[in-house]
């Protein structure tokens, strides 16, 4: 890393972004200027580890508490833990089972999982003071409404909730993360986010990298205060941009790799930061999977834009390099984020040996011919709906309304009400030149039809549940609404925007209180009955 920003001085690049320099100040919204205040609370950059000195690690894999003939049961405790993120400092984190950047749950298609989530967090956030309620969303799974992590279906400290996951969909990369109403951003920032992989026969039969060559990369940013604690500053509910890049919870790690192909499941778990990833060698990434799993065909690009909550499965072929070479995963940055001198590097791969195993070292021309949502066409759509993502009077809104309208209506108000099985085109419209929004729909996978009339990027040609709606962009996506009826959220996945209050809901099928997202199966006080107690054990 070259010249780093010192803790008190802002680089010129930062000043431009902050809008402190005169020309920018006129065009940048006022709330962006307040950002500079946190510079003096921040830890000195000299306390950061040198890039690529911290060893890379894969998050631990969760172990079932119990397995019955039909179901796997897991018990996860959301709790506070002192975690060494920056060398020599103890940072309070909130995470699943106390593991910052994990544990990964591995599922197999057709075998349901029940996860008991216990909220053992402190009663209130140590610095922000809010009550530590949570809700757990498994992002990418079609769960029933009452198990979908609906924002207002909260688990308060001392309570638990059993989430039921059918795992009926195609193999894919998912993640579970906090969704507690109005505190999703703070909770996720503290560490409540982890990966979940769903496998199936097609995926296992392909000669693509598997097992130890199939590696999760959960990438996010963070900032730290002088005591080494996570510093939360969303600049007046605008966004949060940290100067430390974490991969699986570790700052700028280095991974030792063999001279062969690896598959990386890359998740952007940041609150507000978008990335534009490249490799220091200029070599391409080969994309094999999107949010909804394997793409119809592989695609390649030498760089790509990765919005919040999107997942891309990419192959990097290290057989091109000599032993001893280092390949750096770089971030070129996207518009309307604050980049620091320290955010251009993500992690490094050191090529250390010839391959010890050459199984799964190929990229077939056909991956999943029936990739979810990819068979949907414009002509199949029954109707088109438009969703405008705008900032109105300091609030982030969808068509001028917010989650407050849902609360006021006692969860009844909906932005859209497709029939079960209907195909619809949804238009996501961002008329702002100053913001971009990663738009996420629960329940369904969609196909991106076009962006401002142009085809989607090569890496987006697969089933998606989250799409980058850039500045002044209009995206059209097509989806089939199902498999479950009920109420589901649709929101901006910039979690600061989501909390304040850019979150809407849609209802599939007619109004019904069956599977009510809040009342059907609410959290209960701990301890609950034995998990899976009435189920026959293996
Ligand atoms: Cu990843 Cu509604 O969230
Ligand atoms: Cu947004």
Image: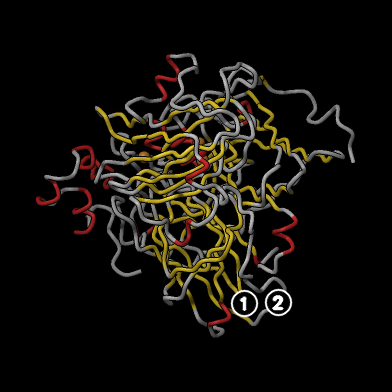
Up the image or down, 51 lies above or below 181; here it is below
Q: Residue furthest front?
A: 379
Q: Say which residue appears at 42% left-offset and 30% top-offset.
A: 503
Q: Quadrant of residue 331?
A: bottom left
Foreground residue, 431 or 128? 431
Q: Say which residue appears at 61% left-offset and 30% top-offset.
A: 120
Q: If the image is split into quadrants, where does the C terminus sit?
A: top right
Foreground residue, 298 or 255? 298
Residue 200 at x, y percent in the picture: 72, 53
Foreground residue, 495 or 83? 495
Can you tell me whether the CB of the residue at mark 1 lies under 8 Å from the nearest atom of ligand 1? Answer: no
Residue 218 at x, y percent in the picture: 53, 54
CB under 8 Å between discs 2 and 1: yes
Q: If the image is split into quadrants, where does the N terminus sit?
A: bottom left
Horizontal side of 241 relative to 521 (left or right) equals left
Q: Is residue 524 visible?
A: yes
Residue 153 numbered tag: none
Q: How is the image coloured?
A: secondary structure
Q: Residue furthest left?
A: 22
Q: Residue furthest bottom?
A: 322
- Read off the residue under disc 2: 358
Horizontal side of 109 relative to 10 (left or right) equals right
Residue 249 at x, y percent in the picture: 52, 53
- Read off the residue under disc 1: 260
Up the image or down, 50 lies above or below 106; here it is below
Horizontal side of 499 relative to 364 (left or right) equals left
Mark 2 neighbour class, 10 Å CA radius: few under 14, some 14 to 19, many 20 or more = few
* Mark 2: secondary structure: loop
* Mark 1: secondary structure: loop
């Amino acid at each position: 890393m070259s010249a780093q920003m010192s803790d008190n001085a802002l680089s010129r690049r930062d000043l431009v972004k902050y809008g402190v320099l005169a020309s920018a100040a006129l065009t940048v919204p006022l709330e962006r200027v307040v950002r500079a205040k946190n510079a003096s609370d921040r830890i000195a950059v000299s306390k950061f580890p040198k890039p690529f000195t911290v060893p890379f690690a894969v998050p631990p894999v969760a172990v079932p508490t119990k397995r019955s003939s039909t179901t796997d049961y897991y018990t996860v405790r959301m709790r506070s833990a002192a975690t060494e993120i920056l060398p020599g400092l103890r940072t309070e984190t909130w995470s699943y089972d106390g593991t910052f950047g994990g544990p990964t749950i591995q599922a197999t298609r057709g075998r349901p999982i029940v996860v008991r989530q216990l909220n053992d967090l402190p009663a209130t956030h140590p610095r922000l003071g809010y009550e530590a309620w949570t809700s757990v969303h498994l992002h990418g799974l079609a769960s029933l409404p009452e198990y979908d992590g609906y924002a207002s279906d909260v688990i308060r400290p001392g309570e638990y909730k059993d989430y039921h996951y059918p795992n009926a969909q195609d193999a894919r990369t998912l993640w579970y993360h906090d969704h507690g109403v109005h505190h999703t951003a703070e909770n996720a920032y503290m560490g409540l986010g982890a990966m979940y992989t769903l496998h199936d026969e097609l995926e296992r039969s392909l000669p693509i990298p598997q097992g130890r060559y199939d590696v999760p990369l959960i990438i996010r940013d963070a900032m730290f205060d002088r005591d080494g604690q996570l510093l939360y500053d969303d600049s007046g509910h605008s966004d949060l941009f940290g100067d430390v890049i974490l991969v699986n919870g570790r700052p700028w790690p280095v991974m030792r790799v063999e001279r062969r192909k690896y598959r990386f499941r890359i998740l952007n778990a940041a609150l507000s930061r978008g990335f534009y990833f490249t490799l220091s060698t200029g070599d391409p990434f080969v994309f094999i999977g999107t949010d909804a799993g394997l793409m119809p065909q592989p695609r390649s690009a030498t760089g790509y834009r990765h919005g919040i909550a999107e997942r891309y499965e990419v192959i990097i072929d290290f057989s091109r390099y000599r032993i001893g070479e280092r390949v750096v995963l770089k971030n070129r940055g996207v518009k309307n984020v604050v980049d620091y001198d320290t955010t251009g590097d993500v992690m490094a791969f050191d090529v250390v040996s010839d391959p010890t195993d050459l199984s799964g070292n190929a990229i077939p021309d056909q991956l999943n011919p029936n990739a979810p949502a990819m068979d949907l066409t414009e002509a199949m759509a029954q109707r088109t709906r438009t969703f405008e993502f705008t900032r109105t009077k300091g609030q982030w809104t969808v068509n001028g309304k917010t989650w407050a309208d849902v609360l006021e209506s006692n969860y009844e108000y909906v932005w859209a009400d497709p029939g079960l099985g209907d195909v619809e085109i949804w238009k996501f419209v961002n008329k702002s030149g100053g913001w971009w929004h990663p738009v996420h729909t629960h329940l369904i996978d969609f196909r991106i039809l076009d962006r401002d009339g142009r085809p989607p990027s090569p890496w987006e040609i697969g089933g998606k549940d989250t799409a980058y709606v850039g500045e002044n962009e209009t995206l059209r996506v097509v989806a089939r609404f199902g498999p479950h009826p009920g109420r589901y959220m649709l929101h901006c996945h910039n979690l600061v925007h989501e909390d304040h209050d850019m979150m809407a809901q849609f209802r599939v099928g007619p109004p019904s209180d069956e599977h009510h997202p809040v009342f059907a199966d609410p959290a209960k006080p701990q301890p609950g009955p034995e998990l899976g107690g009435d189920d026959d054990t293996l």
